[in-house]
Structures are given as structure tokens and as C-alpha cells.
Image (cartoon, rainbow, N blue to C red):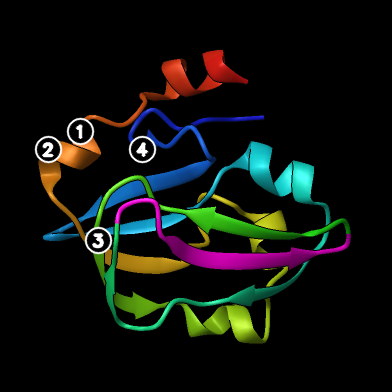
Amino acid sequence: MSYPSDLRYTKDHIWFKENGETFLIGVTDYAQDQLGEVLYVDLPAAGTVDAEGTIFEIESSKSATVMQIPFAVEVVAANEELDDDPENINNAPYDTWIAEVKADEADVAGLLSAADYEATL
């Protein structure tokens, strides 16, 4: 499994990638492997998600998993391509973003580095 060094990670297996003034988020390679075949993603609606709130849900061949965000974010977009192709998360977890969010840069900077994330697994 790989953990790109240009991303930041939550302990709950969400990655953050800087995208200009926003961040793209998705699930890690480890998470998609543990989930099994992704069948459906309940994409977030635009608006604010509070700290420890549910950012999205993933339904897979093994389970339905609620993904929570560690700090407040504002969802500005969701990857609607996942409505038709949720398996992209399994095929390319770091190329398949789930939501685009505005977040405090200091909060994102405080997340785990790739090496720190890998050490938690």
C-alpha cells in the first residue's frame, strides 16, 4: 500500500490534498482495502460539517461505514462521478476525491504526515 507524502491524513483514514484555496478529500488505500468493493458513496451536501460530524458514508461489500471529520469544514463540492462509478475509490484511492472542502489551513497542517499515518496502522 502507498501513502503519498504530499497528502495529510486523519487517524480515521481520510486524506486531504491542497487544491488552491480548498482541499480535496478521499479515503486512503488502507481504508479502501479494508472496506472491500465500494458499492455506493453517500456524498455530502454543500454546507458546513461540524467537528466530529459525518462527512460522507461508504457502502461496500463488507459494511456501511460512516466517515467523520476531525474539525469543522465547509463542503463546496462533491464528486458526483462516484454516483455512477463508486469503484473508482478501489481502483485509484488517491486520484478519486469524494468532496472538496474549505478548511482552516492550521487544522489540515496538524493532521498526520504519510509516515505518521502509516505508523498508526
Identify the amino acid type marked 1: Ala
Label 4: few (<14), some (14–19) or many (≥20) C-alpha neighbours in 10 Å:
many
Task: Check residue 28 for magenta coloring.
Answer: no
- The residue singled out by tag 1 in the image is 109
Image spot of residue 82 (x, y percent) = 59, 78
Q: Residue at x 52, y 67 (%)?
A: 56
Residue 65 is left or right of residue 5, and the answer is: right
Q: Earlier in the sequence, mark 2 or mark 4?
A: 4
Q: Earlier in the sequence, mark 3 or mark 2?
A: 3
- The residue singled out by tag 4 in the image is 7
- The residue singled out by tag 3 in the image is 73
Q: Which marked residue is nearer to the observer: mark 2 or mark 4?
A: 2
| Label 3–label 2 contact, CB within 8 A | no
| Label 1–label 2 contact, CB within 8 A | yes
Identify the amino acid type marked 4: Leu
Q: Which marked residue is nearer to the observer: mark 4 or mark 3?
A: 3
Image spot of residue 96 (x, y percent) = 52, 62
The picture quadrant where one finds residue 86 is bottom right
User: In the drawing, what numbered circle is on residue 9?
Assistant: none
CA separation, marks 2 and 4?
Answer: 14 Å
Q: Earlier in the sequence, mark 4 or mark 1?
A: 4
Secondary structure found at label 2 = helix
Secondary structure found at label 1 = helix
Q: Which marked residue is nearer to the observer: mark 3 or mark 1?
A: 3
Residue 92 is left or right of residue 4, and the answer is: right
Q: Residue at x 43, y 44 (%)?
A: 15
Identify the amino acid type marked 3: Val
Identify the amino acid type marked 2: Ala
Q: Nearer the viewer, residue 96 or 100?
A: 100
